[in-house]
Image (cartoon, rainbow, N blue to C red):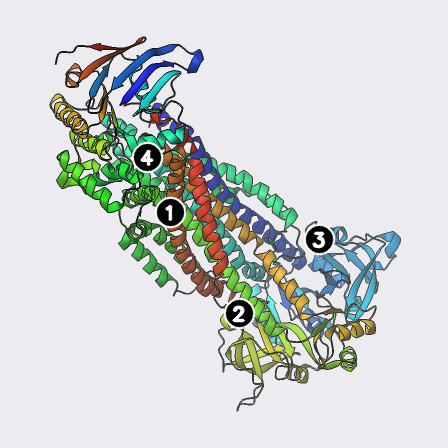
Amino acid sequence: MNAGLRHVFLASLARRRLATALSLLAIALGVALGLAVQLIHGAALDEFGRGMRLVAGEADLQVMGPRTGFDDALYVLLAQRPEVADASPILEVEASLPQRDDSLRVFGVDALRVRRVQPALMPVPEAEVAGEFGIFAADGVFLSPAAQAALGPGTGGTLAVLAGPREEHLRILGSVPGAGRGQRLAVMDIAAAQRLFDQVGRVTRIDLRLAQGVDRAAAIERLRPLLPPGVELLAPEAAASQVAGLSRAYRVNLTMLAAIALLTGGFLVFSTQLLSVVRRRQELALLRALGLDRRTLLRGLLAEGALLGFVGGLVGVALGYALSALAFSIVGADLGAGYFEGVEPGLRFEPLATAVYLVLGVAAGVAGAWLPAREASRVAPARALRASDDVEVLRARPRGPAALASLGLALLLCLLPPLGGIPVFGYAAIALILAGSVLVLPAVVRLAMRALDGGRFVLLRLAHARLAAAPGQVVVAGAGVVASVALAAAMAIMVSSFRTSVDDWLSDVLPADLYLRASSSGASAFLTPEVIAQVAATPGVSSVQPVRFDTLRLDEAQFPVTLIARPVAEGAPVPLVEGDAASVRGADGLPPAWVSEAMADLFRLAVGDTLSLPFGGAPHRFRVAGVWRDYARQHGAVLVELADYRALTNDSRSNNVAIRVAPGVQAETVAAALQAQFVGRNFELAAPGEIRATTLAVFDRTFLVTYLMEAVAILIGLFGVSTSFAALATARRKEFGMLRHLGLTRRDIGRLLALEGALGAAVGVAVGLAAGGAVALVLVEVVNRQSFHWSMDIRLPLAALAAFAVTLVLLAAVAARLSGYQAMRQSAVLAVREDW
Amino acid sequence: MLELDGLAKRFDGQAGRALFSHVSLRLAPGECVAIMGESGVGKSTLLNCIAGLEAVDAGSIRLDGTELVALDDDAFARLRRRSYGFVFQAFHLLPHLTLAQNVALPLWLLDCAAAEAQQRATAMLAQVGLGDRADDWPRHLSGGEMQRVAIARALVHRPTLVLADEPTGNLDAERAADVLELLLGSIRSAGAIGILVTHSRAAAARTDRVLRLTATGLAEEAVAA
């Protein structure tokens, strides 16, 4: 195509500035959201991976155990093995910090070993405060630069941590410069850490550097038999990939939401291009009559879409980086979801992701322009030159079979399992539902118009006749509305179902009157049996149920699962979805265990199966008595009777305790008594209402980004209504001029446009709501189940959806009315100027 | 009765160049006149002024004794609905309405019941020779047929005044003659007043009077068919 011809096509974009600008903006927003999600999570994952590599250092293999650790005799055993050149034991504790909601990772290290295996963790004492043997000091700690910046006190100051029920003050003797800026951690002597956190003789990890010439796989094969149950031998990168895997579903979910925003942008390009083709029908026919071939015409029109996509993509890329920078500073690297706590990544230029999203922008532009371009290239020039009305093009061929095929295929895809833990087929089903709902629009418009009588109201009759004869007008204006409404409705239904289910679940799991816990975060604090006894003896307390948490490594490929030991028979009810909570041993004598839905999915467990849980240094067999709903732990959890756990481990510590008050006693009275009793201790006392409020606040924060994306998609949908009606009103200015001649006022024309906008949007919203319901079902039953392993009860937020639908229809009416303003303002005489 | 007295119109209001002035005319029901004149003399503007779509700078327009110059936009719109019919050069049928619906449009605007509007529109279509195509679409018609529908639309609500600007401008001579006969015949039989703006002497010759518009007013002239 030569420069002159290029100008003929591309200059059209400049001629319709508003539509071009809105299309650009729509693509830019889609690209920006997608790229921002990618950049933010990419940076967080990079930093997290860097942290894992940094902590692993030169290690070839890592011996990992549960959170409560394992016997450090294993270290001696492994260090003497011929396959091992160096072994470095580590006690890693998620230390609770008094009066703070966050925790600090404290690494107890052997300074002589860490230098050779994990040099980045080497503490550097400040000579003036640390003295000659500062790195072995029992009360000394070394902070990474990020920890120093976050926690305040520098070298020479003190750091308060919770160790069991005690608050301990450690002297800050220096720094860990090798940790870099993004890692918030502390290092201290391993013996001191063991004493401090009541873990004498225990380590949580041993990092191994293999002897020269020893193959890693061979070493794993030879060393694995030496490990006690619940302790795994992993390559350092496996641990990082476990965390990445845990957050992957969440990241893919957000990326898909951004993709839908981009898809809506593509619909907008479709609307504006189709209307442009309608307006330029005679111009394009003239070009064809002058000798332009179909293919060049098609290419020219596709080039318009590509240019829109490219410029929109460029703006989107700039916006994406700006959004990422903003998100880092406001909600953090995990976008509020809590996957990457303790990591402070920085924004970097990502050439590959940038290029991919730029290409996606161009693809959205070209895809949007495809159908209108094909339509224009197929029209016979003689016919197009003669006919100047837009109804012919906007008649919209019925695509019932394609719509049905689309929806049928979506149904089939929902039955397929995830690929690599990602519900790929679920997302494909969502895309097919959206496509099917747009394809079904012309048929729905015809049905709706058949059902709706114009009545005596002339404007309604005119609007009715227009939409009945040109359902394509609704398709053009409504495609974006359908996609955005479907997305918004689906998310609203999913979030409402999720939130209600979480709320119900909280009622189930928080039946007590008060909860006392050792600390709001971290694992270093716990409650001793003496504290539990004191609580039980407090006046007004009717009963207490202590709870103990630990982590268990069941499979090297999976993230550790959480062990919860509490009284089940007399304690809080278990929110079961399968099985029963009767705490009785079966005929085989095995104690019962109740697994969460995530654990049942991840480890393919069902009621009646046997399960081996490695704790207390030995494997213990349990019978799966039930599957329960757990919204707190995506990686899985297993619940056992506290009595069984204690009998097997001799661990009498607890992390929190549920307290029931005696009949007639106010919970506040007991709370006051407990606070007086434990004054100065870092225990946290909370009523179920407070815990529920905090949990739901975290829930809402997690979905904040989702709401933002929904709002953007709806905005883009409204852009679609606005640009469509602006273009249609301009194309119909002669019709409006004639109606003015026949006695309609300008106001009447405005009302007519508003009515058409409202009717079109109502159909779009109705189809969008139906599609949204279907997408919500896929989200709840397929995407969430396969991504997070959570089931939930469907709850329709009917009032909110109705308000949303009415608001959108009204907004569409206003958008149509405002967009047609220019065409309405034109003098009736000028509109039919060629005649008068 | 339509009475124009001393109408004057300038380009861009009072400060602009005079387009025409001293335009006076009296037309009785059933009378059809043609207005001719040089291009740019303001023939179409005069029709616009009569239709209330452009304001006059001086003078008076009375229809059946009612002064129209002082009417506001909405009041004139209501008057047009009731008392005016229009025939355009390019027909201006709404492509999304059937022929009957296009013809019924003025009745809809007058809040006529759907069944009655349909019945009157179909009868009117029969009068213009398209009675069997009431449910057809404008895209299936020839130019002459489209103008027949436009004539039916202009007369269906029995207006007092029918304004037609170059109603045969898009038609060949044979069709133009047919359409003109139909238009003038229909206006006369309906007892309406008809004003045609045309460049065609043949068309003008079929009206009752031919008037030439100049900058200084309307003058009657004799035209041989």
Q: Answer yes or no: are tags 4 and 1 on the same subunit.
A: yes
Of pointers 3 and 2, the one earlier in the residue sequence: 3
Q: Nearer the viewer, mark 4 or mark 3?
A: 4
- The answer to whether the residues at label 2 and label 4 have Cβ atoms under 8 Å apart is no
Label 2 sits on what residue type? Ala
Is A94 left, or right, of A168 in this rendering?
left
Q: Quadrant of residue A388?
A: top left
Look at 56% across and 78% down and name the residue there: A594
Query: Are the numbered discs 3 and 2 placed on the same chain, yes or no?
Result: yes
Task: Check if mark 2 and mark 4 are on a common chain.
Answer: yes
Where, by quadrant of the figure, is residue A729 drawn?
Answer: top left
Instruction: Indicate which label's residue lies in the foreground, 1 or 3.
Output: 1
Point out residue A33 in the picture as x, y percentages from the top left corner: 52, 46
Q: Which residue is mark 3?
A: A179
Residue at the far top in the pictured view: B216
Q: Residue drawn 14% across and 19% down?
A: B206
Residue type beneath disc 1: Leu
Which residue shows up at 45% across the image and 65% down it?
A781
State the quadrant of the C terminus of chain B: top left
Regarding mark 1 in the picture, which secondary structure is present there?
helix
Tell which of A385 and A341 is nearer to you: A385
Which chain does the numbered disc 3 sit on? A
Q: Disc number at residue A759?
A: 1
**Do the residues at discs 1 and 3 belong to one chain?**
yes
Label 1 is found on which chain of the structure? A
Answer with the quarter of the image where residue A303 lies: top left
Which disc number belongs to residue A598?
2
Numbered disc in front, either 2 or 4: 4
Q: Alpha carbon of mark 1 to alpha carbon of mark 3: how far? A: 61 Å
Q: Quadrant of the N terminus of chain B?
A: top left
